[in-house]
Image (cartoon, rainbow, N blue to C red):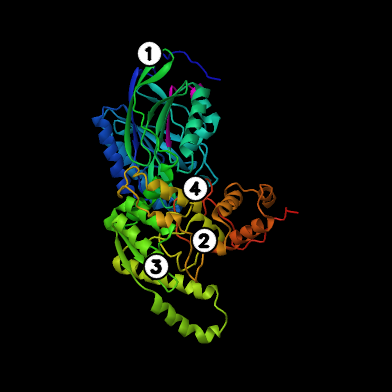
Amino acid sequence: MARHRQRPPTTQLGQPVTDRLRIALAQLNPKVGDLAGNLALARGALADAVAAKADILLLSELFLTGYFPDDLLFKPKFIADAMQAARDLVADTAGTDVVLILPTVWLEKTGLHNAVVVAEDGRIIATRLKRELPNSDVFYERRYFVPGPLTEPVLIKGVPIGIPICEDIWHPSVCEHLAMRGAEIMLCPNGSPYWTNKQHVRKDLVRARVAEDDVPMLYLNQVGGQDELVFDGASFGMEPGNKLVFQGKSFQTDFIVSDWVRGDNGWVCVQGEVVDLTTTDEAPWLACVLGLRDYVHKNGFKQVVLGLSGGIDSAVVAAMAVDALGAENVHCIMLPYRYTSEASLKDAKDCAERLGVRYDVVSIGDPVDQALAELAPIFDNRPADLAEENIQSRMRGVVLMAVSNKLGSMLLTTGNKSEMGVGYATIYGDMNGGYNPLKDMFKMDVYRLAGWRNSHVPGDCKGPAGEVIPQAIIAKAPSAELRPNQTDQDSLPPYPVLDAILKGIVEDELSLAEIVAQGYDQALVERIERLLNIAEYKRRQSAPGPKLTVKAFGLGRKYPITNGYKDRTIG
């Protein structure tokens, strides 16, 4: 139930009370560990806030260190350098009218904290410590930080401001305490990564806190890619009465200024822009593009190379790479062998031409045949099987890595979540690469996004409009083309079935009995689970890729390689 408070007195703790506030949110793209670079970004935001005549500037969670710094937090020198960078930024507020709310690491007698430092006129006027430390899925803050107490509001321009930090708002007690202690506005800095429907989940969460506490909340999120995480921005403000008063850009940096006036019933926003959120169709594409762009650039690369096979996965990755980096920075190579069809040769070239990328053909025929000849005495006339097929894939990996090494381009790999789930990929072959944009995307979603991209040029993407992925590629039966007339369904069930079973096991954590009860064949479900388990060692050695779903392989799903557990609940 909403809590209604009396209008505050004209002064609090000797400070004059203002009835107007201009609040700036800096939705920026920090880089983990880059203290100097992030400090420069913060200084730019402070200058923007001064120019905008803002009263308050809020930065996103752990801004100076980047979110999340992982075991950098165990380095005393890193902590000392981060705190010095914070003090340098605090000093920059001298002579301005801007109160800076800076989220950063802060070392107290109680230990290391995820904190905010509040600075005014060159000095620290308050610190506040994050109380609720997430320790699930991709978050493990309790490994590094000590939780803070329930804290008081901070008096800013005479107005009591609550500053819950990210996870704090997932626990009603934190905001309730701040509201009961007189907070009139909540400013919440976040490091909230994207996954499906996350933007709507955040809004529902803030809507609940605002309704409970009868206090408006301004929610700031960072933007950008950090290894397997993509932060989508989409910062927003909400008033009591379920009123969205401003909405920032999705998957882009933004500087959001809103004006607030105190009325008889509390603070209301009188000036704020609402930008449309990305659609659920557009968001996964933009997440992959942003994650790829930042992974390449933040790791010092300019260009990428990939094998373009004429299949759907490599075509989609090529289109994402062009959207992220521009056609001039994408190099596609077709690597045919005797089983490569004429249709694949034609389709790969067509796709490359539509995207405007450099396209080369490097035959692996002679190297593979020579390798087979050299291995013949060891193979001793045994029937051909996966060993011979994998030599083709690994030879392609050798060629692509050679180009990557010689030209300095990052190699992209193109396996999707369905294939990675059951190990339908060759380690040290088509799994070679520094980054995989499709790692958390099921096969049927790859098809869906290919069709969607052919009708849209989303966001700030750099690729051309029109049908960039040839319809012939979308329509053909998927095949690794490692033996005559091969299709993926020779080894796997149809992808709609495979995707549904994998989603049940991986994302929904269902028992095999529960999946069989949905109508799937018991023997098939048991086989898919076995393939999933034995492929764990491959996934441990796979390239990182952007998290798109609730449960992604890698950072969000860690299963033992040596695993004796078997689900025996069927029958």
**First of labels 2, 3 by sequence position:** 3
Residue at 40% x, 36% y is: 234
Q: What percent of the width, then of the height, locates residue 478?
A: 48, 60
Q: Find the distance from the CA under tag 3 to the CA under tag 1.
A: 81 Å
Q: Say which residue appears at 54% left-offset and 45% top-offset.
A: 135
Q: Earlier in the sequence, mark 1 or mark 2?
A: 1
Q: Is residue 67 visible?
A: no
Give the residue type that dot 3 points to: Glu
Q: Position of residue 251 (x, y in %)?
A: 37, 42
Give amino acid for label 4: Tyr
Disc 4 marks which residue?
Answer: 144
Residue occupied by mark 3: 342
**To which residue does mark 1 refer?**
10
Instruction: Residue type at mark 1: give it.
Output: Thr
Query: Pointer 2 and pointer 4: residues touching (CB < 8 Å)?
Result: no
- Pointer 2 with pointer 3, Cβ within 8 A: no
